[in-house]
Amino acid sequence: MLLTPQPTPIQEIHDAVFDQAGVRLLIKRLDLVHPLISGNKWYKLKYNLITAREQGFETLLSFGGAYSNHIHALAGAGAEYGFKTIGVIRGEEHKPLNPTLQFAVDHGMRLHYLNRVDYRHKDSAEIIEYMKDEFGDFYLIPEGGSNAMAVQGCAEIIAEIDQPFDVIACACGTAGTLSGLIAGLQGQHQALGVAVLKGAGFLGDEVRLLLSESGNQQYENWQINLDYHFGGYAKTKPELLDFMRRFEAANVIPLEPVYTGKLMFGLYDLIAANHFQRGQTVLALHSGGLQGRVGFEI
C-alpha cells in the first residue's frame, strides 16, 4: 500500500506588524495535500492505514466530536483506500447533519453516537468490547488519530520543508501533530503548539507520552500556548471571525475557525507582542479541515 503526499507550497504572509517586529511568517499549505484526506490528517493516518491493511483489517473505527477533522479525513481515507469506516461521535445525534458528518456519511462512514458520560470512558476495555459486540472486528484509531504511528507520519512533514525556519507552529488538539514535528526536528529549531481546547494543560503530558510510545527521546525544544482557544473546541468569538475575514482578504488563503483560524490569530498576536526574536522565521502549518468553515459567517 503506497501513500505518497501531494507536494504542497510554502507561502510568505506579509504584514506591517511583522516588519515592525522583524519576523517573517510562512505558511505550509498542507490543506492542499489531498482532496479527501486534508492537511495533517493525511500524515496522521498514513501508517495507521498501512498497518491496518497489513494486518488484514477491513474496517476502521475511531472517535471524534461532531466537527472533527479526523472523522472527516477517516471517512475520506476509507473511501479512497477501500476500508469500511465507523465514526463514534461524542453527544447526541442532531439533524440535519453538519457538513463534516454529512461528508462522512456520503463517503460510506457509519455513525454511532455515545453520550458524553460514556464518551469520557471511550478508551476503556468495557467500551471497546461493546463496540466489538456492536460492529465486529475493527482496527482502532484513537480520537484525533494521535498514536505512535501518527507521530511517525507527522515527523515526515519536516523533511518536506525546503525553506529555512526557526520556529514551526501548529494548532494543537490531541498533540499528535505537534509530537510528530518535535520528533522530526530531532532537537533542532523550536516547535510551538497553539491549543484549540479550553483547559488543555494536559497536552504537555500527551506530547511526552506520544514521544515515548513512538520510540523518540524527550526533546525540550517545544512549548504549548494555551491563550487562544476562544472559549473551547469549535467555539469562536467575533474578534476571531473578524481576524479571519481580514486575513483571507489580504492573503487569499482560506482558514477555518476550529484550528487554523486560532493558530494564525495567535501567531499574529505573539509576533506583535515581540514573543519571537527579531530576525526569526516562523513557519505555520495549515492543517486543512476547511469544511469547518461552513455554518460560520466568514
Image (cartoon, rainbow, N blue to C red):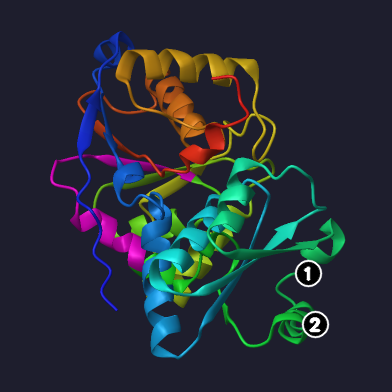
Q: Residue at x 49, y 30 (%)?
A: 261
Can the viewer see residue 19 in this picture? yes
Q: Residue 77, which numbered label?
A: none
x, y (%) of residue 71?
A: 57, 57
Q: Which quadrant of the structure image shows residue 27?
A: top left
Report the residue marked by disc 2.
Answer: 126
User: Tag 1's secondary structure?
Assistant: loop
Q: Are marks 2 and 1 in contact (CB under 8 Å)?
A: yes
| Residue 169 forms part of the magenta stretch | yes
Q: Residues within 10 Å of mark 2 (few under 14, many from 20)?
A: few
x, y (%) of residue 167?
A: 30, 40
Q: Residue at x 51, y 39 (%)?
A: 291
Callout 2 amino acid = Glu
Q: Which residues are magenta?
A: 153-171
| Residue 251 forms part of the magenta stretch | no
Report the residue marked by disc 1.
Answer: 121
